[in-house]
Amino acid sequence: MMLSVSAALLLTLAWVHQAQTLYFHIGETEKKCFIEEIPDETMVIGKYRTQLWDKQSGSFLPSTPGLGMHVEIKDPDTKIILSRQYGSDGRFTFTSHTPGEHQICLHSNSTKMALFAGGKLRVHLDIQVGEHTNNYPEIAAKDKLTELQLRVRQLLDQVEQIQKEQNYQRYREERFRMTSESTNQRVLWWSIAQTLILIVTGIWQMKHLKSFFEAKKLV
């Protein structure tokens, strides 16, 4: 029994948002956006660094200090919660207040075409959500926590994040249920309208045929 409970706990912990690291290429005026589903009241930290393609070496090299990125973040209601310019390497932080899909967009804030020279800019992006944003070694040093106390702190943070994830899933289920009920209700009313139209059409056809037969003196 204890083994199954532990396995379930491990699976639940693995289900929590993990840090996401990726890289992508953009041009001078190109804009890249990413969708991240985030529960409410959850901290998100994004870190990025940029590299420019160097034709001489045939590889990507660190960008010049004059090249930077503009970061824009919108909540599920398309409200801008962060819009700021950063350098070639940057770090942005925000806290979600509405559960749902958040849009994270990045594009170069440079207008110097010579920096690109027809090449591509590589952006390395690291997004951390929830308890993954915590710097536990720093917390342990600041609060003077033992290894056991630090582990308990990590588990408490993970449990809190799991609760937020579960609340978000319930929120999604509620929205899906409301959408399904609304769709079913519309289908029902449309079926009733079709039935009424068929009945009215049938009555009209019967009256029209009766009038036709009476005019021909067949009835």
Image (cartoon, helix red, strand yellow):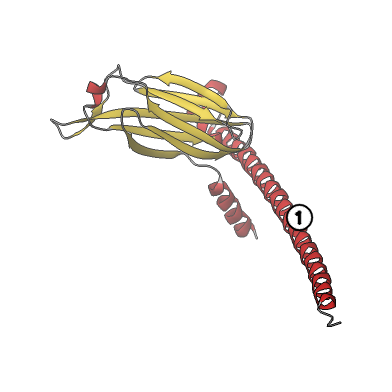
Q: Quadrant of residue 98?
A: top right
Q: Is residue 13 above or below residue 208?
A: above
- The answer, for residue 135, to whether it is visible in the render is no
Task: Classify residue 161 as left or right of residue 188.
Answer: left
Residue 32 placed where, x, y %? 41, 34
Q: Count the marks.
A: 1
Residue receiving disc 1: 185
**Between 209 and 143, the one nearer to me in the picture:** 209
Task: Classify residue 36 as left or right of residue 106.
Answer: right
Q: Quadrant of residue 81?
A: top right
Q: Is residue 180 above or below residue 33?
A: below
Q: Residue furthest left?
A: 56
Task: Classify residue 26 as left or right of residue 163.
Answer: left
- The answer, for residue 99, to whether it is visible in the render is yes
SS label for mark 1: helix
Q: Which quadrant holds the C terminus? A: bottom right
Residue 29 placed where, x, y %? 34, 28
**Between 143 and 55, the one nearer to me in the picture:** 55
**Between 44 and 215, the one nearer to me in the picture:** 215
